[in-house]
Structures are given as structure tokens and as C-alpha cells.
Image: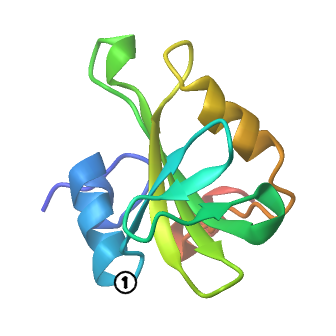
Amino acid sequence: MITNENSTMPYMKSLSSCLNKMTQDGYSADFKATEEGLYDLGTHKIYYPSDVRIVNFFRFEGPSNPEDNAILYVIEAGDGVKGTLVDAYGVYSDPYVDRFIRNVDDIHKKVSTEEKGLTH
């Protein structure tokens, strides 16, 4: 089994496999950042930075092309909605995503047991 170099979790191998894992874990809402806020594509509800917390995020790098860089945000809203937001990473990022994320106060990065052991 091939694993991501940053983690021993096999679902981290690609953006699509990580998205599938997050959906299996209950993060099924698809979010899009807009001028108004974070838009739930399923319910059409708008969330503001104070309405959500980012419980985790993952960065993915393409093998050689900067356009292949992406970041996946795992988000929980105060009303119980759980979902994901995907953006390009770096110079190709969406300015609405960047502005929204910078205004979220509650952002966490979960570190796996294996990664904790590497940070001594």
C-alpha cells in the first residue's frame, strides 16, 4: 500500500481519496466561498466566518506543476452542517476563499499519532 509522504494514512494519497474519506466521515456538504460568505451548494445557506470552525485541512502538491497544488478544508458549522471546501493553493487560490479563511477564528490542524512522533 502506498502512503502519502506526510502521513501514514492511505486515504491521504490524493485529493479525491481524501474527499471520499471526509464524505464517509460525515462531511458531506459542498461549500463554495463567495463575496457574501461560505455558500452551501446543497442547502443554499450562507455561513459567515464566525459561524464555522475548520477542524482540519490538507495540502496536496502536484508532481511538477504549481497549478496542481490544492488545499482541502474540513469544516463544521454551528448548526451541525459538516462539509468541505477545496481551493487551489498559492498564486492560483481563490481570493474569496482566502478572505473567508483569514477571518475564521477557529482553525485546527489535526496531527496524526505518527506525525506527533516526528516532531520531537
Q: Residue at x 22, y 52 (%)?
A: 16
Disc 1 marks which amino acid?
Answer: Asp
Of residues 46 and 58, the one nearer the viewer is 46
- Against 45, is 57 above or below? above
Count of numbered circles on the image: 1
27 left or right of 33 in image: left
Q: x, y (%) of residue 8?
A: 36, 64
Q: Where's the C terminus, which quadrant? A: bottom right
Q: Residue at x 37, y 46 (%)?
A: 5
Judge whether residue 47 can be spotted in this image. Answer: yes
Looking at this view, is 26 or 9 the one in front? 26
Q: Residue at left 60%, top 87%? A: 80
Residue 106, horizontal then vertical, whole percent = 82, 65
Q: Residues within 10 Å of mark 1 (few under 14, many from 20)?
A: few
The image quarter containing residue 24 is bottom left
Instruction: Work out whether 74 lies above or below 76.
Output: above
Q: Position of residue 113 (x, y in %)?
A: 56, 75
Q: Is residue 43 above or below residue 59?
A: below
Question: Which residue does the numbered mark 1 point to in the structure image?
Answer: 25
Name the secondary structure under disc 1: loop
Is residue 14 something that shows in the picture?
no
State left or right for residue 22 relative to residue 32.
left
- Residue 82's spot in the image, x, y percent? 51, 77
